[in-house]
Amino acid sequence: MRLGLICIAAIALSGCADKSATADDLNTIDLTIPGGRTIKVETMIDPKDQLRGMMFRTSMQPGHGMLFIYREAGSHPHFMYQTLIPLDIIWLDADRRILQIVANAPPCKTQASKCPTYGPDEASKYVLELAGGMAGTYGLKAGDQVRF
């Protein structure tokens, strides 16, 4: 009886769901850059997810990115170990202003300890990764503010 009620409830609630949503949308938010363009960004909040980031991924869709959200502002260097595509790496402060952009950071195909690290001297709270070249395409520069 209880299983039957659960099944009925699940069927009834399934009609309420957004049919266009996918599992990939669960950790995705909209980020707006200067000029009003919106980018869909996958949020990385859990430290394990942050360590993995873009590792082993072979592409990033146009208009998409990855946003690392750190609990505290501080030094948050990134490196390209096991990352298969060039990325633009953008550090943001707590006010969501761009501190630094590393354009077209190349994949690192050597040992992790030999991969260069990137990051500003200033404390950052967020790091945005875009496909290589997209920061230039969007006209992003230090001092710009994004919204999310």
Image (cartoon, rainbow, N blue to C red):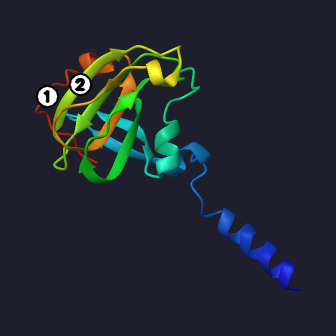
Callout 1 crowding tier (Cα within 10 Å): few <14, some 14–19, many ≥20: few
Horizontal placement of 39 versus 98: left or right? right
Horizontal placement of 6 versus 28: left or right? right
Q: Which residue is mark 1?
A: 142
Foreground: 137 or 18?
Answer: 137
Question: Going 46% across and 43% down the picture, which residue do you hit?
Answer: 50
Amino acid found under the numbered disc labelled 1: Ala
Res 146 quadrant in image: top left
**Considering only order in the chain, which callout, 1 or 2, is on the residue closer to the N terminus?**
2
- Residue at the farthest front position: 113
User: Do the residues under discs 2 and 1 have CB atoms within 8 angstroms?
Assistant: yes
Foreground: 25 or 93?
Answer: 93
Question: Going 13% across and 28% down the picture, which residue do you hit?
Answer: 142
- Labelled disc at residue 54: none
- Residue at the farthest left position: 143
Visible residue check, residue 22: no
Q: Quadrant of the N terminus?
A: bottom right
Dot 1 lies on which element? Answer: loop
Amino acid found under the numbered disc labelled 2: Ile
Where does residue 55 sit, x and y in percent of width and height?
54, 29
Horizontal placement of 46 versus 123: left or right? right
Res 30 quadrant in image: top left
Q: Which residue is mark 2?
A: 101
Vertical relation: 75 (above or below) 2: above
Vertical relation: 109 (above or below) 66: above
Dot 2 lies on which element? Answer: strand
Foreground: 143 or 15?
Answer: 143
